[in-house]
């Protein structure tokens, strides 16, 4: 195929005698031989050169073009990226929601970022009447919607179990009219009993549960409000439910320099004692970030080289043990950029993302189920186009970073270039986690 060039968004990583190609715009991932990659590079002397069909298999060129690794020579890929992101931003067929079921929490984690919730000193639940308003909002769009993704959040969402049961059944009923639904729960795991898990099992796509290390470490980082430990009950609930929730539980660990060794011990323990490396949907790690108040007053938060190396260290350890991971390179665009996605609290105030919860709201859901927007922040977050995104090969998977974390910065950008520059290590870990057997089977 003539008149094509290599996409500027293509990342190439050597992996066990092959080259892994990942395109940050199309999100395509392929493995090709080193010889094919070298011939492809050699056929391109500059950004606008043609690829000679004689040097490569025609079917390979066609496949790489279909997947976005090769594009027409005269195409301005910055405009392609801008269009691609805008299509995602303004697609009305998709709705995403973080639904806060309660402001109550039965834990007292010293690093909890939700200090605005704690400062309110109020115990509010989302009532079933309030949930019905959310369903009215969804039903007003049933002729347009094709996908509804809902994450139940808190506080601790399982403290408002009655509303949760109503909500998952209501959302599941949307399938009868052709709307695909995905429901997830972010829970501390203390109330995820076997009985409740069984009741929720027909509806829930995934459950995220946090363990921050072995018992001694975890119990210091995630104690009950009275100071007692939570490790034993959380682990029991995971083990009691893992058969029914096979490949649906995501284990989350929040890490820093102090607990990373304990998290490693935890991963080893869960594999050796319970075989969870084969039963979990995956594991995910985040460096502990500042509180809402800290972000609001302009505290800088970036994935520095030090943080990135810690994440590489713990992801590498997990993958070597056989755990699955998601792609750590994909940081955005976040839901704050999407016109039809938002977070909603127990009083039906709406915010562009969960990071803004309990700050000044962007609007509310009225009694008829109308979304009433009262703040220009809502629109500025949707329409914001970070200038860095158009000039960076990581732009499509970062898009200026977290909108909440960047909200008080002058640039409105939370650049994570130090982290993303380690793409070779992260991409190799992701491939090893997800496709090792497939690649080994090929040769």
Image (tube, grey):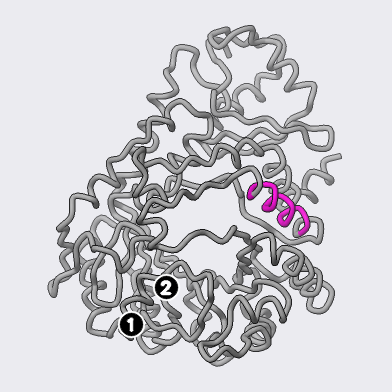
Is 49 positioned to the left or the right of 375 in the image? right
Quadrant assignment, res 133 = bottom left
Estimate the x, y position of residue 255 in percent, counting from the top left.
64, 62
Give the x, y percent position of residue 6: 58, 20
* Residue 239 inside the magenta-drawn segment: no
The answer to which of 308 and 27 lies nearer the viewer is: 308
Q: Is residue 198 visible?
A: no
> Quick one: quadrant of the N terminus?
top right
Residue 95: image quadrant is bottom left
Q: Which residues are magenta?
A: 307-317
Marker disc for residue 152? 2
Measure the C-alpha gap from mark 2 to mark 1: 21 Å
Looking at the image, tell me whether mark 2 or mark 1 is earlier in sequence order. 1
Q: Is residue 316 magenta?
A: yes
Q: Which residue is mark 1?
A: 121
**Which structural element holds mark 1?**
loop
The residue furthest right is: 443
The residue under the point 27% across, 85% down is 128
Question: How many marks are shown on the rendered structure?
Answer: 2
Q: Nearer the viewer, residue 267 or 291?
A: 291
The residue positioned 36% from the left and 38% from the top of the image is 411
* Drawn side of residue 388 relative to residue 11, left or right: left
Q: Secondary structure at mark 2?
A: strand
């Amino acid at each position: 195929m003539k008149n094509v060039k290599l996409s500027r968004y293509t990342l190439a990583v050597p992996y066990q005698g092959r080259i892994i190609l990942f395109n940050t715009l199309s999100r395509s991932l392929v493995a090709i031989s080193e010889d094919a990659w070298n011939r492809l590079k050699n056929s391109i002397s500059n950004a606008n050169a043609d690829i000679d069909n004689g040097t490569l298999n025609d079917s390979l060129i066609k496949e790489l073009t279909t997947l976005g690794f090769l594009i027409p020579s005269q195409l301005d890929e910055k405009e392609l990226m801008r269009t691609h992101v805008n299509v995602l931003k303004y697609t009305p067929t998709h709705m995403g929601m973080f639904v806060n079921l309660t402001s109550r929490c039965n834990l007292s984690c010293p690093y909890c970022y939700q200090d605005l919730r704690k400062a309110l000193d109020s115990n509010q639940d989302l009532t079933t009447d309030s949930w019905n308003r959310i369903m009215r909002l969804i039903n007003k769009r049933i002729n347009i919607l094709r996908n509804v993704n809902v994450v139940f959040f808190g506080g601790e969402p399982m403290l408002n179990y009655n509303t949760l049961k109503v909500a998952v059944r209501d959302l599941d009923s949307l399938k009868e009219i052709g709307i695909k639904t995905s429901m997830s729960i972010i829970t501390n795991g203390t109330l995820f009993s076997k009985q409740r898990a069984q009741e929720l099992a027909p509806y829930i796509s995934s459950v995220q549960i946090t363990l921050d290390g072995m018992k001694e470490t975890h119990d210091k980082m995630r104690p009950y409000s009275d100071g007692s430990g939570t490790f034993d009950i959380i682990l029991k609930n995971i083990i009691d439910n893992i058969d029914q929730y096979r490949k649906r539980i995501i284990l989350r660990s929040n890490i820093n320099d102090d607990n990373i060794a304990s998290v490693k011990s935890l991963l080893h323990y869960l594999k050796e004692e319970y075989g969870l490396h084969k039963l979990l949907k995956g594991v995910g790690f985040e460096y502990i970030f500042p509180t809402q108040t800290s972000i609001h007053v302009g505290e800088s938060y970036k994935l520095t080289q030090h943080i990135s190396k810690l994440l590489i260290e713990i992801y590498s350890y997990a993958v070597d043990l056989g755990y699955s991971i998601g792609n750590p390179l994909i940081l955005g665009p976040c839901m704050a950029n999407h016109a039809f996605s938002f977070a909603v609290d127990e009083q039906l105030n709406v915010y562009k993302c969960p990071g803004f919860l309990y700050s000044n709201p962007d609007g509310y859901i009225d009694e008829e189920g109308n979304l009433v927007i009262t703040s220009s922040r809502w629109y500025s977050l949707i329409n914001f186009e970070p200038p860095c995104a158009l000039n960076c090969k990581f732009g499509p998977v970062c898009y200026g970073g977290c909108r909440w974390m960047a909200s008080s910065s002058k640039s409105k950008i939370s650049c994570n270039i130090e982290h993303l520059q380690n793409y070779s290590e992260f991409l190799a870990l992701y491939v090893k986690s997800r496709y090792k057997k497939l690649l080994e089977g090929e040769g």
